[in-house]
Image (tube, rainbow, N blue to C red):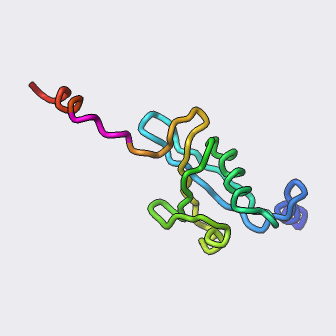
Amino acid sequence: PASARAAMVVFQGETVERLVFLCSPGDGDGRRPKKGMVPLVKGITWEDFLARASRRLGLRRITAVHAWDGGPELSSLEALLEVDEGRTLVVTGEHADGSAGAQPPPPLPAAAAGAAGPE
């Protein structure tokens, strides 16, 4: 219906130009992947977009936004607008509890690695 379409164009008093789908990968500590959507509204800045994405995914700070898993890193709204609307952006960052998300665990020190090996 036309009324539903109008609701998508104006959301909470802001004109929505595009819907951006996001995902934050899980990690080896049992944290599950999170998915979300952020409306790209008229007049938004890159910093505003990052703040909205952080809140949506429960991240304290975003460290990277990629066009897709393994895709190019995005650092501006202009770059984001070049990505196909059907793509889900991959977002990494620090979780609200201070842990880093989707990062490999640090390597063991050589002494600890040797101590853990067979005797």
**Which SS type dominates the magenta stretch?**
loop
Side (left or right) of 79 relative to 19: left
Locate the C terminus by quadrant: top left
Residue 112 rendering spot, x and y as whole percentages: 23, 29
**Picture layout, residue 61 above or below residue 1:** above
Please tell me in which quadrant of the rendered image residue 96 appears: top right
Residue 44 rendering spot, x and y as whole percentages: 77, 62
Give the residue at x 86% y 60%.
Answer: 14
Locate the N terminus by quadrant: bottom right
Please tell me in which quadrant of the rendered image residue 41 appears: bottom right
Task: Please state the extent of the stretch shown in magenta in the rendering.
Answer: 105-110
Which of 67 and 6 lies nearest the eye of the viewer?
Answer: 67
**Picture layout, residue 36 above or below residue 41:** above
Please tell me in which quadrant of the rendered image residue 110 appears: top left
Residue 115 rendering spot, x and y as whole percentages: 18, 26
The reply to whether the magenta stretch includes residue 11 is: no
Give the residue at x 49% y 67%.
Answer: 72
Q: Residue furthest bottom?
A: 82
Give the residue at x 66% y 72%.
Answer: 78
Residue 106 rendering spot, x and y as whole percentages: 36, 40
Q: How many marks?
A: 0
Give the residue at x 57% y 60%.
Answer: 89
Q: Residue furthest left?
A: 119
Which of 25 and 104 lies nearest the eye of the viewer?
Answer: 104
